Image (cartoon, rainbow, N blue to C red):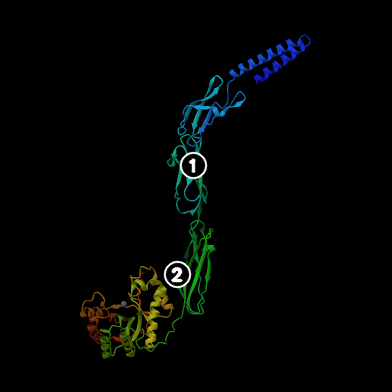
Amino acid sequence: MIITIEILIAIIAIVINIIIFHKKSIKKTILISILIILALIIACLITFVEEKPQIDTNEIIEIEAKTGERLKKPKTTYIFHDVTSSVKIMGNIDYNKIGRYEIKYEVPTVLGKYSKSQIVDVVDKIAPEIKLQGEEVINQSYKSEFEEPGVTAIDNYDGDITSKIITEKNQINENQIEIKYTVTDMSGNTTSKTRKVNLIDDVPPTITLNGDTDVSVIVGNQYKEQGAKATDEKDGDLTSKVQIESNVNTSKTGKYIVTYKVSDNSGNEAIKTRNVSVVEKIEQPKPTTNENKGKSGVIYLTFDDGPSSSITPKILDILKKKNIKATFFILNYDSVGEKLVQREINEGHTVAIHGYSHNYKTIYTSVNTYMENITKLQAKIKNSTGYNSTITRFPGGSSNTVSRYNPGIMTKLTKEVVSRGYKYFDWNVSSGDAGEAKTSQDVYNTVTRGLRKSRANIVLMHDFSGNTKTLNALENIINYGINNGYTFDKITESTPMVTHSVNN
Ligand code: ZN
């Protein structure tokens, strides 16, 4: 620019010189012009020598640490020329270490070197990076605690700064929480990331049946639906939403199922079922003529838990010899036992049902289980002998406490058995032959002391295998009864029930 002005002044000087001296002397004019041009050349030379290179740079240059970024040569011009490539950077910069560095640019000039100082700040302005393990949106049960799937933070300068992560848990609404992770590096650069946790209701409602799970209805009677209650931990009482499906047909015996279904507001479904047995009522045989019916002073000898091949035949022999009829409450039997049952029937005794099984732990688990324990044996007797037995005795008696694992079961069973057309008999004279009576004399004493003239005496004895105490006492007991004015009889459908109070 200066040079341009110098040239302009020189041209003006030459023009003025020409205007002034042209007419007087051409020689003078040329000489003065040459002098002016020489002056101009000298001025230009002086200007070139004094000219400084122009370095285009900022006072402070920032360079990001550890990124591979390097200080570049600044754009430099010198006497109309771009001399950037000749610029030398003098001094050291550690690009891996934050700090302030002072360096110099050196540019060669006509008379030597020109240098300019430069401040370089190596900085960390890059924020750390947070990485989430697992999904950014997690769906989980509202009942489970949130478990962190993992999160890490890496900074380009500080390295692993996972331990500096601050985690915040914010409840956005009832169904969502937000986990916010924040980390700040040593240079104060901050990064945040969030994870959403959707709280899903995956807990089905609970259905509680009103009444028993197993119910039975006598064919032709009405099935009374007792309904069910439903509650959900989130939605509360859902009883009004319970849907009931039933295929119960009370005009036909069989097993039916009533299904109760309910869904909560999140679509979780609960199902419960009730087993309904439609059963036949047992036809009561016509009462046989019985002189001692309801009369006092009668002894009903009853033998439980048989038949056994060792004891039952000998008891039958004694009864035959004394011409006395008795009642046998039997259990399931094999082919040998079947002959004994047939003999009991042939010789005029009553065959009654104690149960297919005597196992207290299983037979009292439900009303249906118990009733099947009776009907199974009843069907077996009928199939093998043609004899229909409707007289029963509860294993342990109706006052038993062995069924207390199922509270209230005896109250239900004593009603159920009768409503299904059976009769059940307990006892009012126990021989003690399954327990406290140790000898046949004990059995004799216990029975004879328990007899009362004023009532019907139901005597509990057992004909299970090995029970010689009762076998050996039996004839003496019969003789005692005869000698003391008692009569003997078997239990029939017309005998009034003798029962204990339930004790469950
Ligand atoms: Zn028994």
According to the image, label 2 marks what residue? 213
Q: Is residue 274 above or below residue 452?
A: above
According to the image, label 1 marks what residue? 129
Choose between 288 and 408: the one closer to the eye.
Answer: 408
Choose between 426 and 23: the one closer to the eye.
Answer: 23
Q: Residue at x 49, y 72 (%)?
A: 257
Name the element at disc 2: loop
Whether residue 229 sits left or right of residue 432 in the image: it is right
Position of residue 21 measured from the top left corner of the image (x, y, whole percent):
76, 10
Quarter in which the N terminus is drawn: top right
**Residue projecting furthest to the front:** 27
Earlier in the chain: of badge 2 and badge 1, it is 1
Whether residue 65 sits left or right of residue 9 in the image: it is left
Decide if residue 390 is in sight here: no
Quarter in which the C terminus is drawn: bottom left
Picture disc at residue 78:
none
- In the rendered image, which quarter is residue 361 located in? bottom left
- In the rendered image, which quarter is residue 354 located in? bottom left
Q: Residue at x 35, y 74 (%)?
A: 398
Q: Decide: few, some or many residues near mark 2? Use Cα within 10 Å; few <14, some 14-19, many ≥20.
A: some
